[in-house]
Amino acid sequence: EAGVAQSPRYKIIEKRQSVAFWCNPISGHATLYWYQQILGQGPKLLIQFQNNGVVDDSQLPKDRFSAERLKGVDSTLKIQPAKLEDSAVYLCASVIGAGVWGAFFGQGTRLTVV
Amino acid sequence: GEDVEQSLFLSVREGDSSVINCTYTDSSSTYLYWYKQEPGAGLQLLTYIFSNMDMKQDQRLTVLLNKKDKHLSLRIADTQTGDSAIYFCAERGAGSYQLTFGKGTKLSVIP
């Protein structure tokens, strides 16, 4: 079974530029998350989708971050404009149904804002 | 909000047992998880335990849950150098699919 795919693996941009990350969850997984992991910390939830609807985006900085999950499969996360403090690893995870086995994570995209 | 706390570092000798501890505040937690993160990699689900269980064993891994004290531990028997990584405790509240993570415990295994 293929895992959660993310791209790109690494991205370096200057502050005030825009960036987009892509995620393809495990086939059949209805729930998709985007997490932000700052160096030395645990992942922090940014947004949760159930199929193509947003369940929780309370921790998403909506003035600069946006995310969508068209057709309930792939998802993109965008930052516009980026700030230095956005430097982090952005992790995508997916869960099948009730997800008792926990979320399965992709390898993440490491973003460096300079 | 809900909180998950872990000690930041643990160092053990190869062949010894490692015990990584975690405390959480959400009394409605239904599932608790342990994830492993190796350098430059995503999070790998190691094991999970339902909140109505006290213990779960899976090969070298033993999870103990004290629900009264909201304390979770992960014991790794016969720790190997390949076990060196950051271990994250995570909890999931009732009626939610969201995971709240601790800051992670960095396990260093000394040969």
Image (tube, grey):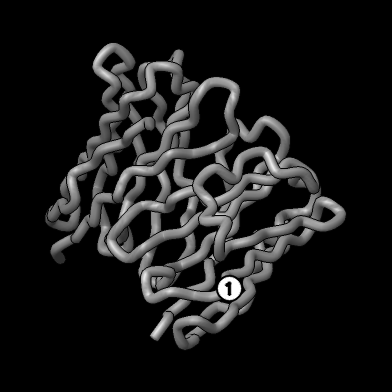
Identify whether B27 is placed above or below B2. Answer: above
x then y, percent, for residue B88: 35, 47
Inspect this view and state whether residue A81 appears: yes
Identify whether A80 is placed above or below B97. Answer: below
Residue name at image x 27 percent, y 58 percent: B80
Which part of the image, by quadrant, shows the N terminus of chain A?
bottom right
Where residue B58 sits, quadrant-wise, is top left
- Three-letter residue code for mark 1: Gln
Q: As drawn, is B36 to the left or to the right of B30?
A: left
Residue name at image x 23 percent, y 36 percent: B21
> Label 1, on which residue?
A80
Which part of the image, by quadrant, shows the C terminus of chain A?
bottom left
Where residue B40 sits, quadrant-wise, is bottom left
x then y, percent, for residue B59: 41, 39
> SS class of the residue under badge 1?
loop
The subunit letter for the residue under badge 1 reads A
Q: Residue A53 versus residue A64: which sits nearer the camera?
A: A64
